[in-house]
Amino acid sequence: MAAFGIATGGGNWFSALALGVTFLKCLLIPTYHSTDFEVHRNWLAITHSLPISQWYYEATSEWTLDYPPFFAWFEYALSHVAKYFDQEMLNVHNLNYSSSRTLLFQRFSVIFTDALFVYAVHECCKCIDGNKAGKELTEKPKFILSVLLLWNFGLLIVDHIHFQYNGFLFGLMLLSIARLFQKRHMEGAFLFAVLLHFKHIYLYVAPAYGIYLLRSYCFTANKPDGSIRWSSFSFLRLISLGLMVFLVSALSLGPFLALPSIFCLWFKPQGPKGFLRSLILCALSSFMFGWHVHEKAILLAVLPMSLLSVGKAGDASIFLILTTTGHYSLFPLLFTAPELPIKILLMLLFTIYSISSLKTLFRKEKPLFNWMETFYLLGLGPLEVFCEFVFPFTSRKLKYPFIPLFLTSVYCAVGITYAWFKLYVSVLTDPPVGKTKKQ
């Protein structure tokens, strides 16, 4: 804490936060890891040992390469560092291979590539109004946002315990969002196009990008009432975007529930923040249709929602409900006993900080939760006690082993659906931005 005080006093508080969470990630290296660890080891072996023509056809392992080409090249680049740690991990026929050096390499590769995420968070902080709240550093929106993103509980357990490379992928997405806030539309579009070729799950939010770029970049001006000025259309800008990004129609990219928010981007523009709300709704709508196919996709909504949480009390309330229930829904991913205290402690620390900091930031406004929301969130405590400490010792465990997962899924579905609904209402009811000219 003393070192943190010195760092913050000298204006290096962001570096202190980044270094602190990096140290925590290093402490998590020996923890449990999922089958995704073997998935990525196998992809290292495939891209290192085989010619490009065989990357997507190699099937010695059940964990075939099924990510887009940029991620394959990413694994290829990592493999040329991995060979200096343990050459055996790069043998395609060494199924389920593991060694201490392999563990260290793969864990540190995630930590190292998180540097892009750290940079993206720093850029997002530049887009936040820094004049709000008190004089204390810990009460300023930029500091709160930095903690909410850098120390995000879900990202920590999914990447640095469960094992994946979401950090640098979300870094690309957040950096893309920051560039759109900064009116650097072409850079934002380029970064998102690159992201799509790393992981196809980001197609969920492509409709929000497509409509926003068309409305805010290809059309260069609005009428005084905020509606579109059709004569301002720039065919040159559309061509320049088309050369960089290939977008699929909104109907083919996601569930129909995402469409009203996309229409609002066009007919009732609300600037970059309106784009961000629609992006989150696209992510949430798609997630709700495939929860148990890809439960980790909740982070695709939680992390962008962090940017809105420090701007308005209403958004902060939605963020806290979404992030608390969304993070708790990830608990079943870490099912071994040694990780139980780790996941509970990390989530408690992140949740307590999130609630206390945002309450302080918006202390002059109405409470962030009503009685019903408070009661619901407090209910997560008894649910965890029952699932982890009561049910395992009952006679029904052998006959109904799915009960804890069932209860967790249903309970969290209520909170996530509620947050989705509240955010949708805000998108549909907030007034449009009445600018007459875009920059």
Image (tube, helix red, strand yellow):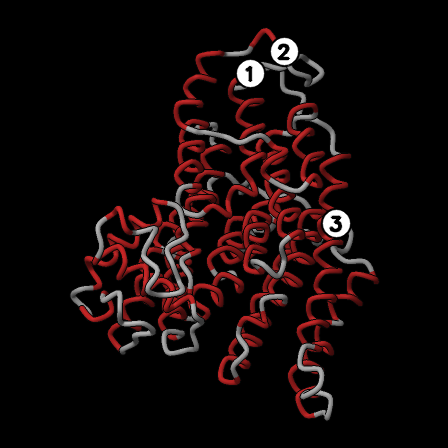
Check disc 3 and report the residue beneath it.
365
Q: Amino acid at mark 1?
A: Phe
| The disc label shown at residue 313, or none | none
Q: Position of residue 203 (x, y in %)?
A: 52, 41
Q: Amino acid at mark 2?
A: Arg
What is the secondary structure assignment of the residue under circle 3? loop
Is 150 left, or right, of 113 in this rendering?
right
Other-residue count near label 3 (Cα within 10 Å), few / some / many at <14 / 14–19 / ≥20: few
Is 268 left, or right, of 110 in this rendering?
right
Say whether disc 2 or disc 3 marks the residue closer to the N-terminus. Answer: 2
In this view of the protein, which residue sits in the foreground, 144 or 68?
A: 68
Other-residue count near label 2 (Cα within 10 Å), few / some / many at <14 / 14–19 / ≥20: some
Say whether disc 1 or disc 2 marks the residue closer to the N-terminus. Answer: 1
Is the residue under label 2 in contact with that under label 1 (CB below 8 Å)?
yes
Q: Position of residue 406 (x, y in %)?
A: 70, 71
Is 354 left, or right, of 321 in this rendering?
left
Check disc 2 and report the residue beneath it.
229
